[in-house]
Amino acid sequence: MSADKVTIKIPRRLYLKIQHLIAESGFNSATDFIVYVLRDVLSETGRETTEDFTSDELKSLKQKLRNLGYLD
């Protein structure tokens, strides 16, 4: 694995849903899709790090990730 990448664990059921979803899309892998979604969520805030988020912004972002199935 490249030094600039990390492994993130997600529930298997979510992974299988993503695989099914991307089967009919332009994404090559579940990883590509997940990176796309996370970049999209972060771009809504105009930031790519969490250092400048307020407490309310972090709560909102976490709720969005929960709604997408990324957090329990």
Image: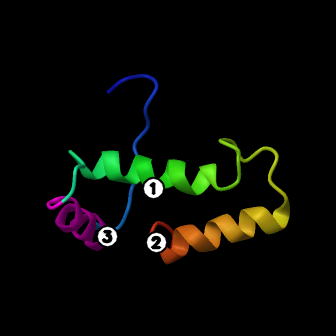
Q: Which residue is mark 3?
A: 14
Distance Cα–Cα, label 1 vs label 2:
9 Å
Q: Residue at x 58, y 71 (%)?
A: 64
Q: As shown in the figure, which amino acid type bears the numbered disc 1?
A: Val
Q: Residue 72 appears at what percent x and percent y?
A: 51, 75
Q: Which residue is mark 1?
A: 37
For marks 1 and 2, give the one nearer the viewer: 1
Which range is magenta?
Answer: 13-24
Magenta stretch encompasses residue 21: yes
Q: Which residue is mark 2?
A: 68
Image height check: is 18 above or below 52? below
Classify residue 66 as left or right of residue 59.
left
**Quarter of the N terminus within the rendering:** top left
Q: Residue at x 20, y 61 (%)?
A: 19
Q: Earlier in the sequence, mark 1 or mark 3?
A: 3
Q: Quadrant of residue 9?
A: bottom left
User: Is disc 2 placed on a helix, strand or loop?
Assistant: loop
Q: Residue at x 61, y 49 (%)?
A: 43
User: Is disc 3 placed on a helix, strand or loop?
Assistant: helix
For marks 1 and 3, give the one nearer the viewer: 1
Q: As shown in the figure, which amino acid type bears the numbered disc 2?
A: Leu
Q: Residue 5 appears at what percent x and percent y?
A: 43, 32
Q: As shown in the figure, which amino acid type bears the numbered disc 3?
A: Leu
Label 1–label 2 contact, CB within 8 A: yes
Distance Cα–Cα, label 3 vs label 2:
9 Å
Q: Quadrant of residue 3?
A: top left
Can residue 38 be seen from the camera position used here? Answer: yes
Distance Cα–Cα, label 1 vs label 3:
14 Å
| Mark 1 crowdedness (10 Å alpha carbons): few <14, some 14-19, many ≥20 | some
